[in-house]
Image (tube, rainbow, N blue to C red):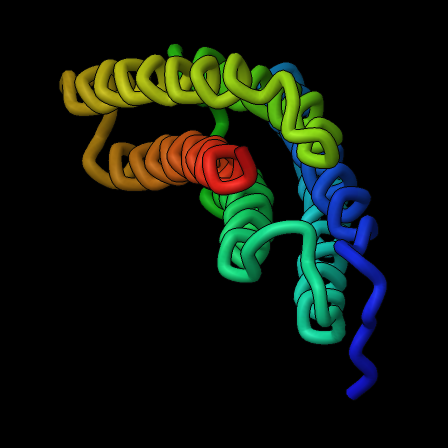
Amino acid sequence: MRFSLTPKETSFYDMFAAAAENLVVGSKLLLELLGSDVSARAEIVERMRAAEHAGDDTTHAVFHQLNSSFITPFDREDIYSLASSLDDIMDFMEEAVDLVVLYDIQTLPKGIEQQIEVLARAAELTAEAMPNLRSMSNLTEYWIEVNRLENQADQIHRKLLAHLFSGQYDAIEVLKLKQIVDVLEEAADAFEHVANTVETIAVKES
């Protein structure tokens, strides 16, 4: 295996930025799903699947670079954690869209749009923050706001569960919809994991 002796490989920054931009693509597809006809959802699934594959490619590239670099911009375990958490978010987004189609959900529950809007905002903030890893500057507001958004997502999730268990839906529909809103909640949690990792990196590098 060839090891690089270049001080602090810069390509990691580019790959993290690309992964975060891909999350913006995924969140926009979630928003598009909200306003789409049932007949248009399969095509959205295919575009989300393509975005998820692109995310996988970026994650694999990070791991390959990590294994072939002698010096890294920050701790290896933090690079691995950041790449993995970014990839997890994309996986959860793709899973949610796929489940909507697989379960043939005709009408999404009221309140799920708030979940997705939180994810879209978190994706935007993450995409804005990743380029700042180079200088480790202007990151504090990012992780504070993402943590606030995750708390908001928790409250939305609990209200959605209360709505699903209100008796308005039959048992099978409850199971289907609960799995979808739970996956979206996992995406919100993963955004917080990314923000926490960035905070850890910034503290170590300060």
Question: Percent from the top left, x then y, of residue 104?
Answer: 50, 39
Left or right: residue 199 versus residue 25 is: left
Which quarter of the picture shows residue 155? Answer: top left
How many callouts does the rendering have?
A: 0
Residue 98 visible to the viewer: no
Q: Position of residue 106 (x, y in %)?
A: 49, 27
Question: As drawn, is 58 to the left or to the right of 34?
Answer: right
Residue found 55% across the figure and 39% down from its top? 205
Q: Residue drawn 74% across and 69% down? A: 69
76 versus 181 height, above or below: below
Classify residue 157 as left or right of residue 121.
left
Depth order, front residue of 161/141 = 141
Q: Residue 3 at what x, y percent from top left?
A: 79, 78
- Can residue 126 be seen here? The reply is yes
- In the image shown, does 199 or 110 lie closer to the viewer? 199
Q: Quadrant of the N terminus?
A: bottom right
Quarter of the view holding residue 33: top right
Q: Is residue 91 above or below residue 173?
A: below
Q: Position of residue 95 (x, y in %)?
A: 52, 46
Location of residue 149 (image quadrant)? top left
